[in-house]
Image (cartoon, rainbow, N blue to C red):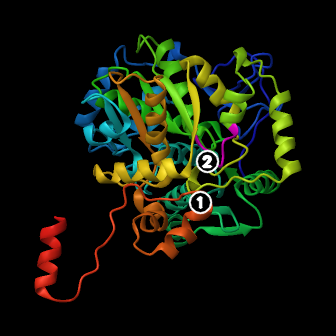
Amino acid sequence: MIHTAAQHNAVRTDLAFQRCINPVCGATYDSSELHTSCPKCSNLLDVAYDWDRIAVPKHLNEFEAMWSQRTNPVRFSGVWRFHELLPFAPQDRVVTVGEGQTLLQQTDAVGEYVGMDNGKLHLQYEGMNPSGSFKDNGMCAAVTHASILGAQRAACASTGNTSASLALYCSATRLMKAIIFIGSGKISYGKLSQALDYGALTVQIAGDFDDAMLRVREVAKELGIYLVNSVNPFRLEGQKTIMFRVLEALRWEVPDWIVVPGGNLGNSSAFGKAFMELKELGLIDRVPRIAVINASGADTLYELHERRGVRWNGGHVNMDPIVQYNDQMDREGIKADTIASAIEINRPVNLKKCLRALEFTDGVVRQVSDQEILDAKARVGAGGFGCEPASAASVAGAKMLRREGVISASDRVVCILTGHELKDPTATVAYHTTDQEVFHKTLGSRGVTKASFANKAIAVPNELDNIIKAIQLYA
């Protein structure tokens, strides 16, 4: 069983603790407790720190010294290298499998497609993580917290990447058993194969991700299982470090824009928290604007923020439009449906934290079609970085914002590529295929009518002269 402790509302004496994001409530809890929401008011929780008692570097460039300690697994990790900015666990207790060895690639090839000046578009490629997605940044933090609490089992609902990451950490560390909840038919084989291969117990239920999320929270509470979905505040602490690595790659200069796909809204929430803390600590003097990009088939954030005017409002969120929209989805049977399966989510659990991030960064929200996503994905691939469809939503969104004039051609823009191309190869092959039946069966039902940038195979007779002629013609 996981250790839980009584609620605390007194002045904190520990360096790290949990705090309700609702400013009216503000209840605090020990970091040794397991909560996925505030027991007092049911809002989300943050991991908070007594920064006055923590030896935080005075300048971000002091983290460069950690590279000389790369034989230390803690400093080799692209997450724990920044331990001073997420010090909820002692260094000798952190869990790592070498996550965070990712890169920020400046690309004019994709920048031209988006409409940017040369040297201005950057892709943060999180597909280089051990399980192939950004989830490893947060999972190492969540599993660290779980191990400190003595958890024997950890669970998640997943569209694929979270399950792959949890299964990998449980298998590689042998600290606990992974239990995965997936919806029927709502996971790509590339991701499902990881969870199965890594030995996780996989539970498939009738329904979609939102149904699986509801059940896993009930089961985790009933059986005392550690929940690692992004409703867990410790997981988001690890995801903050994506922004630290972006700043590191830019020589600690803050970009103008961070563009990120929006699903369960964990990344956008973590990024906002990262910049809030860096600004509070005086480590940056300005913040970038965050753009969250929904797929049009799963556009709850866009609907609420851009059409219904829902805002953080200093923590006083008007819940009426949210409740009304949720009721409408239930009444009309609206289910998320997009080729970008990683963001195929109707009820994002981190909605309020994302609204807070948007307010703090003067952010915007957009939605892009599956056609726009796959076209952007093809251009990213042609530029040398294969990514899963959800990743390409960031590039499609940047192109849309550039077309609208919200992003200027001279702005420095960072698009987050959240997962590796091989996470969902079916969509890639269908887009580039010469088989029209395969194309329409896989993509046509989602409104994709053409492959604008298809790189189709050429069929030639098995004769040397014909092969040579074809190569000379096309290459």
Residue drawn at point x = 67 percent, y = 35 percent: 301
Sequence-earlier tag: 1 or 2:
2
Q: Which residues are magenta?
A: 294-300
Q: Please indicate whether residue 165 sits to the left or right of residue 243 in the image.
A: right
Q: Quadrant of residue 254?
A: top left
Measured as percent of width and height from the top left, residue 338 is found at 61, 54
**Label 2 crowd (10 A; few <14 / some 14-19 / many >=20):** many
Q: Quadrant of residue 266?
A: top right
**Label 1 crowd (10 A; few <14 / some 14-19 / many >=20):** many
Q: Are marks 1 and 2 in contact (CB under 8 Å)?
A: yes
Measured as percent of width and height from the top left, residue 318 is found at 81, 22
Camera-nearest residue between 355 and 28: 355
Amino acid of disc 1: Met
Local SS, label 1: loop
Residue drawn at point x = 38 percent, y = 54 percent: 378
Q: Check the image and report above or below for 264 versus 38.
A: below
Amino acid of disc 2: Ala
Q: In this figure, which residue is indicated by the disc labeled 1?
A: 176
Measured as percent of width and height from the top left, residue 1 is found at 73, 53
Q: Check the image and report above or below for 31 versus 275.
A: below
Residue drawn at point x = 45 percent, y = 21 percent: 288
Camera-nearest residue between 151 and 366: 366
- Confirm whether residue 162 shows in the render: no
Q: In this figure, which residue is indicated by the disc labeled 2?
A: 146
